[in-house]
Amino acid sequence: MIGALKKLEVDFRGELPLVSNLDQLEALKVKYLGRKGLFTSVSGRIAELSKEEKKLAGQAMNRVKLLLEQLFADRESLFKSQAISSEKKIDTTMPGTFYAPGSLHPLTRVILDVTQLFERLGFSVVDGPEVETEYHNFEALNIPPNHPARDGFDTFYLENGHLLRSQTSTVQIRIMEKVKPPLKIIAPGKVYRPDATDATHAFMFHQIEGLMVDKDTSFADLKGALLAFAKEFFGSKTRLRFRPHFFPFTEPSAEVDIFWEAQGQWLEILGAGMVHPNVLSALKIDPRAYAGFAFGMGVERIAMLKYGVEDIRQFFENDVRFLRQFE
């Protein structure tokens, strides 16, 4: 029987190298180690041996079975690794995959251009939360409860009593709470108002607000800053006009228009004015010693002017054909 086991091992070692895939390997395993395989046939003769012979035969059986199982496992592992390697193999003769490079969204590009422009004028870029309190969005901006001006700055309210900011003026308030004058800041960000969507309005849009507070600040400083911005951003021949207006948080106030060549008409792009003394006093800044100017512009509006876009909704439709024009 020991001789038969040795022959079984020799035969197996001779057949194993001839196997070329997992299916053939499984068939060989069934032939030798299956329930009706050769190993079972040989090991079944142990009952015919004497007590002394059974001990030696049992040891040989264990050795041969373990050896065959190990050789099977090694060859199976080899075939599987070769299959994985084959799947990952790169065919260098095939053309490569082209991934089109991305680019900045036109609104992001405009925000960067404007903030960098004002940084060159000495302003610092700041940010603030989009979820705000009524105090920062209204009361601190000289808009008390039941004031009719709230209608124009209405927004979306949350269940916890907070709201989505309707203007980035809230950032100006938060900065003045922490930093005392002199200060010059520019605050870009998203704002929300329940406006009906049309070619020039959206319920979510972007604003860039600026604030300067210092001694002897005047409306001439405000006009100079906005003229410098307009002529650098839109071109040296840009036509700009100031129209008297009312804002609760500035006095005097103005709306600023730029002539929209694509439509042949004036388009209001920002509101501006001198910071109201009530706002300064509420923030413990003495309005007799300091004065300030503030302005807020719609990013979408100035992007429409700069790029000749006639419908604000195109900025949010994610139409690649539209966006590729700004790469």
Image (cartoon, rainbow, N blue to C red):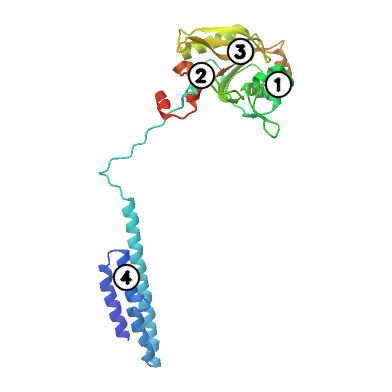
- Residue 114 — which label? 2
Q: Position of residue 189 (x, y in %)?
A: 57, 25
The local secondary structure at tag 4 comes to helix
Amino acid type at mark 2: Val
User: From mark 1 to mark 2, how far is it between C-alphas?
Assistant: 26 Å
Real-space Cα distance between discs 4 and 3?
86 Å
Q: Earlier in the sequence, mark 1 or mark 4?
A: 4
Label 3 amino acid? Ala
Residue named by callout 1: 140
Residue 285 shows in this picture: no
Q: Earlier in the sequence, mark 4 or mark 3?
A: 4
**In the image, 124: left or right of 15?**
right
Residue corresponding to mark 4: 27
Viewer-nearest of discs 1 and 4: 4
Task: Give the residue pinned by disc 3.
Answer: 272
* First-in-chain label (2 vs 3): 2
- Residue 30, placed above or below residue 244: below
Above/below status of 218 relative to 98: above
Determine whether, in the image, residue 205 is placed left or right of residue 131.
left
Q: What residue type is disc 4 on?
A: Ala
Mark 1 vs mark 4, CA separation in Å: 83 Å
Which residue is the extreme one toward the bottom? 50
| Residue 252 in picture, x, y percent from top left | 66, 8
Contact? badges 1 and 3 (CB < 8 Å): no
